[in-house]
Amino acid sequence: MEVFVWNMAISFQLLFIIVSGVIFLYLRDKSFKYYGLYNIFLIIYVLSRSDTVYYGFEDLLKPIFGSEDAEMITTILNFLVPIIFYTFYSIFAFYFLDFDKNAKKYFKRTKWVVNFMAYLFVGFAALCMAMRNADLFVTLYLYIYVPVMLVIFVLTLMQAIQRSGEHKFFFLIGVVVFVFCALVALAGSFIPSLGMENPITFFFIGNIIETIFFSLGLAHKVKLINEERNRINVSVTKHRHQQQISKLQGLLEGEEKERKRIAEELHDGIAGDLSAIKYNLAYLKLKNKNPENEEVLRDVTQIIDKSCIQIREISHNLSPSSITNFGLITALQNFCMKIENIYGIPIRFTSTGERIELDKVIETHIYRIVQELVNNIIKHAEAKTAEVMITHRHPHITVSVKDNGKGFEMKKNNKGIGFGNIDSRIRFMNAKFSKTESKTGSSFLIEINIDNLPQT
């Protein structure tokens, strides 16, 4: 039975040396570096529990130091190795229980004490070897190191219950069992009256149980780490997206302001100047009754009237006041009617579904996209008819623009088509844009989810 448990302990430690290395490489969590070192020194200690290994190591030292000194050195090292692996295990436990984040003062102070005890007993080991007194080192180990580490264990247990995450429960159960079994094994080794034949078996059993419960705690912690990484990634992605939306919003708002400024200048400036010219021409016509000049004045007046109409249309297109006054549907309907009157291309407009009530900024973006598509149909598609249809089925709004023309390319580097303008507005609204072509014409589809619209 003892051999079977010993083999089990060896197998578990070999497995977790590999596991800790893989996890360290995967998570880049430095705590698993300490866990790997703990496993390496623990397996050395477990191996040393075999008489073959223990006395074999002692035999190696005899030719160098002599029989008595070899026995003394082997005894001291046999107690120094547990100090080393307990040190690594304690530091790992502090990290694994997230003391470095949730109990920083306790983490720093206790880590310092654990490291100090390790260095102190390395010094004691050297001193006892120099004094050729292994019994002194064992006494120091039993009456100084063990009590101090037990106090740290109890304090750490209390801190972990208060400060650590959900993964602590599996880990703490394993640690408590391990410490209890280690104390039983220690007591059985130094108190003959207990009558324990192989007390070290309790240490092996405790180690195996601790490893099993640690595995459960580790799986839970890896799950928590992955969830936290995913949460951070989502947060970073959301933040970057919000930055892009803010940037786009600023650009689009600037564009709308510039459009409005130009529209006002056209309406108040150039249109006003043309009206003044028309007034002066009418005055000349009254003063100068020369028939030859009358025909020229009439032609110039007609040109001015036509220019005033075009400027008024351009001004309205640049700054569609109908969106503010009447809403998106009426603005699109009026736009289609104006295009039909100016260019003679029938444009059928239909609106179905629920009433659309959106922020004016969003309505302006939808209007601009439709405006850009219709203008490009007129300029490039050579279409005879076109259709604009908008459908609202909460939370989805679908805008469809169709024509029976030859189509046109939507390229970002084609400034005349204005794809960059459309693309910016589509991205700002978190919408989807698609284009299909057939022998009967082209179709553009904009799909908007109201729930995904940015706050403006």
Image (tube, grey):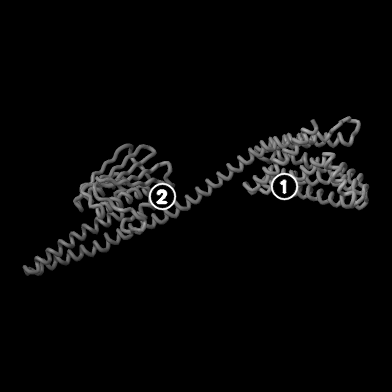
Quarter-of-image position of residue 203 = top right
Residue hosting label 1: 34
Circle 1 crowding by C-alpha within 10 Å: few under 14, some 14–19, many from 20: many
Query: Is any atom of residue 411 visible in this view?
Result: yes
Q: Give the structural element (helix, strand or loop) at label 1.
A: helix
Query: Left or right: where does residue 420 sit relative to residue 51?
Result: left
Q: Is residue 432 above or below residue 309?
A: above
Residue located at (20% from left, 47% from top): 346
Front disc: 1 or 2: 1
Question: At 79% from the left edge and 30% from the top edge, which residue is drawn?
Answer: 1
The residue lying at 42 percent from left, 49 percent from top is 456
Q: Position of residue 347 (x, y in %)?
A: 23, 46
Q: Position of residue 80 (x, y in %)?
A: 83, 46
Left or right, residue 294 beside residue 109 = left
Q: CA distance from mark 1 to mark 2?
A: 48 Å
Q: Is residue 333 visible in this depiction of the protein?
A: no
Disc nearer the start of the sequence (1/2) = 1
Eyeballing the image, is 401 above or below 269? above
Of residues 114 and 205, the one nearer the viewer is 205
Q: Position of residue 423 (x, y in %)?
A: 38, 52
Secondary structure of the residue carrying tag 2 is helix
- Amino acid tagged 2: Arg
Q: Of residues 454 and 209, which is closer to you in this image?
A: 209
Disc 2 crowd, CA 10 A, few/some/many (<14, 14-19, 20+): some
Residue 427 got which mark?
Answer: 2
